[in-house]
Amino acid sequence: MKKTMLFFFLVTALFLSAQTSVSIYDIQYTTDPGTGNTYPSPYDGQIVITTGIVNAINFKGYKDNIYITMPEGGEWKGLYVYGCGDTTLVVGDEVEVTGSITEYYGLTEMNNVTSTTLLSSGNAVPAPVIITTEQMATEEAYESVLIELNDVYVSQELDDHGQWYVVDTTTVPCQVDDGFFYLDAVTPPIVITLGDNWAVVRGVVSYSYDEYELNPRTPDDLIQTVGAGPVVTPVTNSLIGNYPNPFNPTTEIAYNLVREGFVSIGIYNVKGEKVTSLVNSVKTAGAHEVVWNGTDAQGSNVSSGVYFYKMNSDDTNTTDLKKMVLMK
């Protein structure tokens, strides 16, 4: 009997010693890209204990699939917990969870959760990190983090998998997905239209099928701007617009410079790929126009669709983006 009890205590001690108490940042942060640039956690395969504030629940339709964050929020400070076992948790709860850190097809997550303890309730959720669509689409630091995109355009409409794409002045689009709710299941339904401008798109970043995806938590994470495009500030270099729009086969793009300086204007497709350059030189102050004839850099006609024209000007460090539609 004594030998049995001693064996039990030894096994228990070994099991507890295998559980490491670490922060979410410790779990997520790495400079090792690993296989396929998925940046695996240094704790991959280990049982750990960590704490965080719940900032999203009900991912993929399961109430105990939650996202937690460190109280200050920020890069590398979010974690997806798959099946925490507690379906009563709400946003703002602080929890301690114990489970295995696993790289699930490139997504760092905690699963096989053995313990979830509620520490406190009613905590403030950290503000989202405001980033660009390029950062969202390419940087591991924002995996499982609550982020926000500002002043973006729909570059690809909703597909059969609930995915759509937005793009900002970086011209690199990123994916938006329906991990928390379906756009057509809310009242009123949310309609995604190619080329529409959205003031705010926020949510939690996940990773699936070799691509980062932004998942709005509720309809409140989507705020649409009334109007066709970004606000133009008269005291800066700016794109005025293009006419006609839609057009076939040519359109005239107008822009204004507050003072002489180097200017570049390029045409981009909905994938963020540069089609051609229209301006790449020093221009005088004042109003200017340039014509695009619907061809690429090699002079070949491009297909019908939505295109973006972006202006960069070194003198005032200005970037401006607008959309146009080529209809044949």
Image (spheres, rainbow, N blue to C red):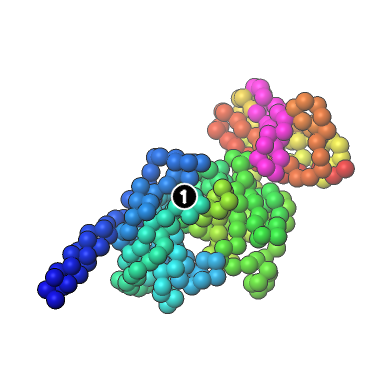
* Kind of residue sitting beneath label 1: Tyr
Q: Where is residue 155 in the image (x, y as percent from the top left)?
A: 68, 48
Q: Is residue 252 above or below residue 122?
A: above
On whether residue 267 falls in the magenta region, the answer is: yes
Q: Does residue 38 appear anywhere in the picture?
A: yes
Region of the chain picked out in magenta, as a range: 264-288
Q: Quadrant of residue 240?
A: top right
Q: Which residue is drawn at 68% across and 34% down?
A: 274
Q: Does residue 228 appear anywhere in the picture?
A: no
- Main SS type for the magenta part? strand
Q: Which residue is drawn at 57% across and 63% down?
A: 179
Q: In this orientation, which residue lies closer to the viewer: 2 or 77?
A: 2
Q: Residue at x 70, y 57 (%)?
A: 159
Residue under circle 1? 142
Q: Which residue is drawn at 57% across and 48% down?
A: 211
Q: Where is residue 3 in the image (x, y as percent from the top left)?
A: 13, 70
Q: In this orientation, which residue lies closer to the viewer: 188 or 162?
A: 162
On whether residue 76 falls in the magenta region, the answer is: no
For this orientation, the residue located farthest to the top is: 282
Quadrant of the image containing the N terminus: bottom left
Q: In this view, does 116 lie to the left or right of 103?
A: left
Q: Where is residue 287 in the image (x, y as percent from the top left)?
A: 71, 32
